């Protein structure tokens, strides 16, 4: 059972590596130092040679390689930021991204799901 997370999160925005073993080692270090929150989003990787979604895909591969690590982290992901078009917080977009993120991270559910940058002009139904 997960406890409430600590105050420090590891952000995946600049995760530009494809070495799963190195990511597993990094997650182990995070765990050893009390970092319990991993911040990611489907847009992470945009502009890199790996493309959008890379961070979530890599997390999924790392957790697949070392499944016991997953229980130590609260994975926070966000949706609604679809570059280069800045924002889409529509119901359809949020639901699609949620399912994509869930599959990429390789989990039946997500711990925390946020709207990346809410758009006040978006209909919420």
Image (spheres, rainbow, N blue to C red):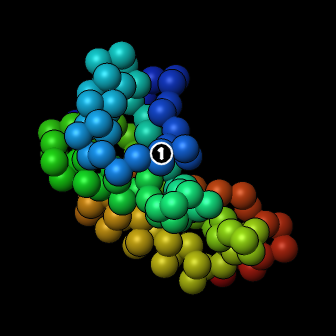
Q: Is residue 37 visible?
A: yes
Q: Is residue 113 visible?
A: no
Along the line of sight, the residue nearer the viewer: 40 or 4: 40
- In percent of width and height, residue 83 lies at 68, 69
Q: Is residue 65 left or right of residue 92?
A: left
Q: Residues within 10 Å of mark 1 (few under 14, many from 20)?
A: some
- In percent of width and height, residue 15 lies at 48, 45
- In percent of width and height, residue 66 lies at 16, 42
What is the quadrant of residue 123 in the picture?
bottom right
Instruction: In the displayed orientation, state which residue is furthest to the front.
Output: 49
What is the quadrant of residue 5 in the picture?
top left
Q: Is residue 121 left or right of residue 67?
A: right
Residue indicated by mark 1: 15
Q: How many marks?
A: 1
Q: Is residue 85 above or below residue 19?
A: below
Kind of element beneath mark 1: loop
Point 31% across, 22% down: residue: 29
Point 51% across, 61% down: residue: 49
Point 72% across, 58% down: residue: 117
Q: Quadrant of the C terminus?
A: bottom right
């Amino acid at each position: 059972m997960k406890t409430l997370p600590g105050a420090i999160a590891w952000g995946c925005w600049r995760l530009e590596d494809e070495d799963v073993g190195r990511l597993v080692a990094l997650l182990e270090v995070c765990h050893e130092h009390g970092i319990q929150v991993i911040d990611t989003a489907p847009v992470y990787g945009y502009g890199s040679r790996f493309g959008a979604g890379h961070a979530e895909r890599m997390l999924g591969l790392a957790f697949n390689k070392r499944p016991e690590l997953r229980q130590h982290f609260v994975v926070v992901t966000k949706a609604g930021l679809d570059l280069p078009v800045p924002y889409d917080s529509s119901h359809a977009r949020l639901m699609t991204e949620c399912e994509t993120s869930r599959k990429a991270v390789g989990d039946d559910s997500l711990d925390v799901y946020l709207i990346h940058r809410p758009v006040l002009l978006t209909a919420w139904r």
